[in-house]
Image: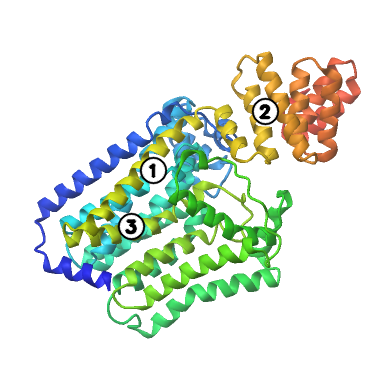
Amino acid sequence: MSEQFFTRRQTSDAPAGTGSQLLQAALAALVLAIATVLAYHGIDQNAFHFDDWPNIVDNASLHMKQFGVDGLLAAVQGAYLPRRPVATLSFAVDWWRGGGAPGAFLTTNLIIHVLTAWAIFAFMLRALTHSTRPTAPAVVACAAAALWWSVQPIHVQAVSYAVQRMTELATLFSVLSVWAYLKARASAGRGAALWGVLSALTLVLAALSKENAWIAPLLILLAEYLVIRNRGSLIRHPRDRLLLALPAITVICVLADILFGGPVSQWALSGYGGRSFTLGERLLTQPKVVLFHVSQILWPLPERFSLEHDVEIVRSAASWEFWLPMGVILAWSGAGALLAARAGTRRAGFFALWVPVTLFIESSFVPLEMVFEHRMYMPTVGFTGLVAIGLLHAASRGPTVRTTGIWSAYLLATGVALWSTSERIPQWRTEASLYEQAVRLAPRSARAWNLLGVANLGQRRDELLTQERYERALSAFDRAIALNDQYAAPWTNRGVARYLQGDIPGAETDLKRAISISSREAAAQHYLGELYERTGRPLEARTARRRACALGVTPDCNR
């Protein structure tokens, strides 16, 4: 009903001239960029974290000294994640232009974030005014919704975490692909072909940025039926029935693969060997995780965000922690399906279904971390579309008490989000500040305490290690070991810290314990070799170094 009103109102309005439309859109894009940069002020002062080290800092193949084809090819060939060459190439360029400084990477991340916000703005305009020229209310509503998206603090993890550029690029190119498809369907002749080529090209770039973009073809399919065919019949050709059945067929094939141990399930299950949870536990816990992320969007206070979160694993389908959030997700999806089934409300259904569709890969059977905020980067585009629809409705009605209330609520929500994002940026300044926040929100996470200890040691930056920081590091490692004494990393790190401070007996005990838990602790083998050499045990030192070499510590291979 409401969407029918939107369409009637837009059609009856006299469209502004092309020049006026471009000016309005340009001004809106400028305001959008300024507000986003304001929210992320100081991001260039932040540091590398966590997965940035193996992907960027410790990956010599990316350290391009001179810009050229050879350097770019070397970066792609030596990528830590070879299926994501687009992000890898951009990392090599940033290393070349910034000399390895994190500020260069984070500035690029912010630029990509602004470009993504612009892409979402253009996409909203195309989706909500597909068959008509955008009116001034449509430009305002879509720009305002894109601004709401761009300043959400849940996106800080994607923007201020250099390696999560992969998530940014996958979202940017996926949105551009759907937008270009809609442009192609609204064009004719050569124009349609060019827009179609652009849609295909950006789809490939999205898939080569991160694997979650593989869902983009389904988003294009949804756009065809729910945006372009917002009115009239969904079925216009016999092939439409097959196309509409494709998602269900895909799900059935995946379930059959899992049931009979096919290649997809073998790949998925193999990744659970190094996890503290099983496939079943992940599937049971993810509905709760998704609703937690939605609550962060609805109540975006800065202290609710972190790299780590304490989320208790759900181990039974009978638990309310599974069936209650799962019921909410099914109700949301069902409401989206009902909107999609009715002529005139299908665009609202498209954005409602966008959320569960884009969460399907990273919040289902794939053996990823249980909780990571950057996963909401693409799904929140669906919420943004619904915000745009609501604001367009308010903008089209003219000044009323209800309209004033809607815009007041929008301004309050966006203002709080912008403030919260600006408050979060300094949390990512150093590894110590990041993990201090992490242990506050996840005090039972052994990994968070271990990484806080590593951050205090400052091993990665050749910083001067004071006695106070050394003691804080040992305390953090002690806490990690107390939480999980079968976690090898804190034993290794505490052993290394003790060795560097001259506590040889304590270091030997810790390093041996780490190796007894996991024989693949390369750092433990290396420092045990150093310890044996220092205490006059050359044969034992040679054995330890040989094992360290086999685990990839190349300096030990020549000793």
Identify whether 481 is placed above or below 329.
Answer: above
Crowdedness of circle 2 by 10 Å Cα count: few (<14), some, many (20+)? many
The reply, left or right, for residue 115 in relation to residue 272 is left
Q: Is residue 168 visible?
A: yes
Q: Nearer the viewer, residue 496 or 405?
A: 405
Q: Which residue is mark 1?
A: 417
Query: What quarter of the picture does the C terminus occupy?
Result: top right
Residue at image coords 29%, 63%: 127
Task: Answer with the quarter of the image where residue 107 lies.
Answer: top left
The reply to whether dot 3 and dot 2 touch (C-beta < 8 Å) is no
Q: Which residue is mark 2?
A: 453
Query: Residue 215, position in %: x, y?
Result: 47, 61
Q: Nearer the viewer, residue 6 or 532?
A: 6
Q: Which residue is mark 3?
A: 387
Crowdedness of circle 1 by 10 Å Cα count: few (<14), some, many (20+)? many
Residue at image coords 52%, 34%: 62
Q: Earlier in the sequence, mark 3 or mark 1?
A: 3
Residue at image coords 66%, 51%: 312
**Is disc 1 placed on a helix, strand or loop?**
helix
The reply to whether dot 3 and dot 1 touch (C-beta < 8 Å) is no
Q: Is residue 521 visible?
A: no
The reply, left or right, for residue 106 in relation to residue 399 is right
Amino acid type at mark 3: Val
Query: Residue 306, position in %: x, y?
Result: 54, 40
Query: Residue 227, position in %: x, y?
Result: 31, 69
Task: Answer with the quarter of the image where residue 155 lies.
Answer: top left
Q: Earlier in the sequence, mark 3 or mark 2?
A: 3
Q: Earlier in the sequence, mark 2 or mark 1?
A: 1
What separation in Å lies between label 2 and label 1 (alpha carbons)?
31 Å
Query: What quarter of the picture does the N terminus occupy?
Result: bottom left
Query: Residue 18, position in %: x, y?
Result: 11, 55
Crowdedness of circle 3 by 10 Å Cα count: few (<14), some, many (20+)? many
